[in-house]
Image (cartoon, rainbow, N blue to C red):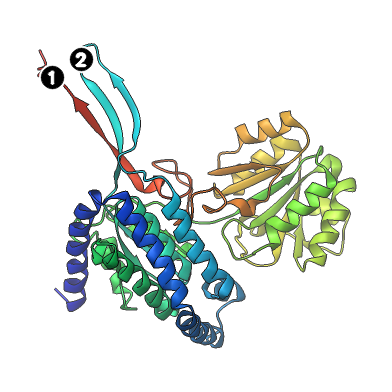
Amino acid sequence: MTALDETMNAIGVAAKDAARAMRAASAAAKNRALIQAADNIDAARADILRVNAAEVAAAREAGKTNAFIDRMALDDGRIDGVCSALRDIAALDDPVGKTLREWNRPNGLSIARVAAPIGVVAVIYESRPNVTVDAAAIALKAGNAVILRGGSECIETNGALYKCFRNACADAGLPETAAQFITTPDRAAVGALLSGLDGAVDLVIPRGGKSLVARVQSDARAPVLSHLDGICHVYIDGDADPEKAVAIAVNSKMRRTGVCGAAETLLIDKGALDRLWPPIAAALREAGCELRVDDAIHALDSAAGKATEEDFQTEYLDAVISVAAVDGVAGAVAHIARYGSGHTETIVTENADAADQFVAGVDSAIVLVNASTQFADGGEFGLGAEIGIATGRLHARGPVGVEELTTYKNVVRGEGQIRP
């Protein structure tokens, strides 16, 4: 066994012990830790920003993309957001011990389904410093222990944020090891986490690019909660309000191009192309977005680039959008079924029947009506924050917040009954 293996196994043992303690932790203690973590980060703001600026400069010099740098960069506004998320999570109802369902049997047994922590959650992520805090906070609020492994490009920033969180746990009387941060950049640490640390890890959550998520899904020995791509669609129906269509299309794509909820494909009802395409195209161009369109739209707008089959399968995470004309709602649903990743889709329409048809037909984790895809976010859902967006069909779908990091147990109370 290597020294790294010994270190990782010790982390697993400590996490398992902490998870047992966290099951019984009071809501008051957990909330104190979260509020104190926010205060600690606020007090350490200058140091955190200094460390982050150095790592951002190094990433820029190394040739990282603008989208990558945007995800790893912190400023005062983002620090404020991290602190607000911690306080918002503290203000949520404690999910642990909540009765989800209860019923009585004819034999007198009383049965209750009660929310319980999952146990030890491993979060493997790339260079998004806010994930260090969001993941630790959500896991702790749900009564879990968490093991954090962030990207090497942001390891010092992540470490500074983690230190603020760990110290807050200790001050609140919770185990410091309720949240552990892997400090080594050695990629073998990821392999050790995926092995399950001798059964210590109960759930793995990857948050990052396609290659990271694919590796986790392939190699993990514990259940995985994740999504591969955020190929999100905006469908502009023939009965759309043009002003809403323009605003939603531009915001969905351009508010932040590097987030997983950014729209990558725009679909337009072909029967309304003449009316809807010109103002939408003009607004996207003015916002600095490159347009890659299918043949039907290119016939109207030869200045736009031509889309390829690959474009409709691409998560650009940049100021580029693919565009296709479709045959109404049915055509939009068929396109999304073929090319979508099950993440987030929206319809813009004033036709309630069309909206209902879209909602029923699209099988994605988040389906919106007359709203930007950029609302695909745990904070915007009122969850305080999120660890990621789950696009599978088991356990959780959409933003993974506090309640999504619980399971349940069945508590059965009797008065001496025996089974005949």
Image coordinates of residue 275 in percent, x first then y, are 89, 46
Q: Which residue is mark 1?
A: 415
Is residue 371 found left or right of 273 in the rendered image?
left
Quadrant including the N terminus: bottom left
The foreground one among 361 and 348 is 348
Determine the secondary structure under disc 2: loop
Distance between the alpha carbons at the discs numbered 1 and 2: 8 Å
The answer to whether residue 125 of the structure is visible from this angle is no
The residue positioned 31% from the left and 69% from the top of the image is 166
CB contact under 8 Å: marks 1 and 2 = yes
Is residue 343 found left or right of 15 in the rendered image?
right
Is residue 325 found left or right of 183 in the rendered image?
right
Labels 1 and 2: the sequence-earlier one: 2
The residue positioned 34% from the left and 66% from the top of the image is 148
Quadrant including the C terminus: top left
Tag of residue 108? 2
The answer to whether residue 316 of the structure is visible from this angle is yes
Image coordinates of residue 128 in percent, x first then y, are 48, 69
Image coordinates of residue 326 in percent, x first then y, are 75, 43
Based on the displayed image, in which of its 4 quarters is residue 394 positioned? top left
Determine the secondary structure under disc 1: loop
Q: Residues within 10 Å of mark 2 (few under 14, many from 20)?
A: few
